[in-house]
Image (spheres, grey):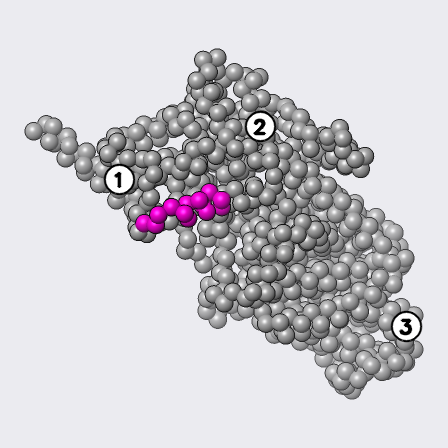
Amino acid sequence: MAAEALETKEAERVEEMEKKLKEKKMSWGKLRRVDSLSLEAGRFSDFSGLHGSKFDWKTTVSLAFQSLGVVYGDIGTSPLYVYSSTFTDGIHHRDDVLGVLSLIIYTILLVPLLKYVFIVLWANDSGDGGTFALYSLICRYTKVSLIPNQQPEDRKLSNYRLDTPSNQLSRSIKIKEKLETSKAAQIMLFLITILGTSMVIGDGVLTPCISVLSAVSGINSLNEDAAMGLTIAILIILFSVQRFGTDKVGYSFAPIIFLWFSFISGIGLYNLFKYGIGVLRAFNPKYIINYFNRNGKQGWISLGGIVLCITVASTGTEAMFADLGHFNVQAVQISFSGIVFPALLSAYSGQAAYLTKFPNHVQDSFYKSIPAPLYWPTFVVAVAAAIIASQAMISGAFSIISQSQSLGCFPRVKVVHTSVKHEGQVYIPEVNYMLMAACVVVTLGFKTTEKIGNAYGIAVVAVMVITTCMVTLIMLIIWKTSMWRIVLFITVFGAVEVVYLSSVLYKFKQGGFLPLAFSFFLMAIMGTWHYVHKQRYMFELSNKVSGDFVKNLALNPDVSRVPGMGLLYSELVQGIPPIFPHFVGNIPSIHSVLVFVSIKSLPISRVAPEERFLFREVEPRDQHMYRCVVRYGYKDAVEDPKEFEQQLVEGLKEFIRHRRFALEEGGQVDPAEKHSNANILRGSSSVIHNEEAVSARHQTLPSVSSGSIQSVNVSKSAHSSSELLQAAEDDMQFVQKAMEKGVVYLLGEAEVVAEPNSSLFKKIIVNYVYTFLRKNFRQGKKVLAIPRSRLLKVGMTYEI
């Protein structure tokens, strides 16, 4: 009776365990091997992001209002300086005002409204915009990433969302194949991406200068030096409060910008009716043709000032649309079409009407056209709007640097997340003070908005052209748009942007060199860091530890197991890193539970916490050694050590429980996987398809029903359900006790040097430039927030 009762109790326990596991809705039929990193990957597949959700009209209108303060601060302040930057030598003909107004109207209509708001906005990466987001989107659909760490499991993430249409076009497939097989195309795409990103960061220097200086210039009693001094004081205060985060003052942004648009539209309508409604003839594009016929080369040069009316085209998309995840596409479209666009038309038309009567006031047309009672209120709101525009650009620069660092394209810096509610709001102390110093130098050097405008245009238009090229690629590969629409897109917008680019390049000597020099400097840093980062990864991949070493280690009596858990960090996701034998050689002992942790950045903005960890058991199976890939999006924050340890251990115990359940159901142990660690890969092409090659081998196995798991080496009769479950419980308790005894972080400090037979240029880049960057920026232990009391480091030299 006692034996029967025990059996009944055991059967109930087994049934309860099975019920709990089945409640997790895991797709066991999709798993190809029990001991795979893909074991965890198929658990969560139903996700609807913000942009896939449907909002009621009240929510959309509310989001549209909130977007005013985040997205449109820069373009909203452009009426302060566009006419003065265009007519640098004064107005020589009355109709020139109509020609410039016509150019402004159609430029805003074509570029920000049609191109960005109604086309480019849909090319967001789960709500995030900008050059890096476009590049990440392309990397998800094509294998163009220069670091070969792609895994099939990544495609099962909810945020990956590869919703490829059913009508696979041969054109898209051919272009994709050419990109994946052309190393030159991959490098070119990467260089274009970091060039665009660098130019936007350069805008982070110029935007605060021109916005604040143009607003401060409204005080008539201030001379040039006094206005410059006040601007520098405001900029220093602005950068000094960055550490508090935009979340503290973000709620006031939208009302202030809305008030600003109300002021400029109201003043514009006032001037329009007072000085002549006839300027609305500028809606006739013939005035553009007449303007160029009348002014010739000088008219073409003046485009460098007109382009400042669409600064949102680049800075807005890259930096301000970078926070698009907090809104939806419809909200941004409503706010621009319903508020921003009409307000700008009114402001520019009103100034044009004023200039037809007072052409000599062109250098200060905005403030001189304001009615006397509204002068000081408008001035106060203008300064506030300029600060908000600067704030948005600075925050965007922080966000872009953070994304670049996550994707291995920028040296390690301290990233402080300033908002609990909004993950994208970050603060980087080192970058903040460098930007502040650069802004002060630029203001001191240029002194006037006209001179800063000469420098500003090149970076703006260059990013516009880069965005057009990348969206065209997305249309070809991902959207599979019809060819005539693609040709129309690149012809219309490409032609407009190339004309503007040729004009702003003419001002290269007048200050246009500054953003280009700054951009190429940042690009050199990003390119150098990414190149060595990639070569270091390839070295680890080519020298990863074989399975025989781990087996011999388990049998080696000289290597002892000490209580506790060890986390050995590496960037390698396809095996055990070469630094591991160095740890064992220097310290002949390993922890009772050892986890090889790989921090992996994915080309998506965020990874859901429940999908972050992937595990695999390292053979021999009774040694409690595991591989773990920890996946982060480029906007995810790294958890503090205590939280990270807890999540990892819980994920590991979950893996152990699922593994035993799969074994009980008749899961397989892949014979190829059993010896996968013994194969030391020597080429990048084999690496990229390593995981997929394993999957391909499974395709040749006899098919089974979708509801079962194939069994190769595991016999269900070898273990009873109770034994398997008891073994799982024992393993989970063992892991928990190891964590309680203490977690030690094992970090390899790899010194990277060029091979002796390398070229002189490569030696300079690797041995000097990269080494200088690595030593003068933050080390890995600081970025990962590893406690020094629990850190163990071992050095090793990598020859690349």
Which of the two discs, 1 and 2, sits closer to the camera?
2
| Mark 1 or 2, nearer chain start | 1
Please, which residue is most extreme toward the left here? Answer: 1
The image quadrant that residue 14 belongs to is top left
Image x and y of residue 64, in percent: 56, 67
Q: Between marks 1 and 3, how big is the CA–CA gap?
A: 80 Å
Residue 670 lies left or right of residue 380; in this view the side is left
**Residue carrying label 3:** 297
Q: Residue at x 63, y 27 (%)?
A: 749
| Residue occupying the point 52% across, 28% down | 546
For the record, the magenta segment spans 692-704
Disc 1 is placed on an element classified as helix
Residue 583, x across and y down, in percent? 56, 21
Amino acid on which disc 3 is placed: Lys
The residue that label 1 is drawn on is 17
Name the kind of residue labelled 2 in the image: Pro
Compared to 291, does 642 lie above or below? above
Q: Is residue 760 visible?
A: yes
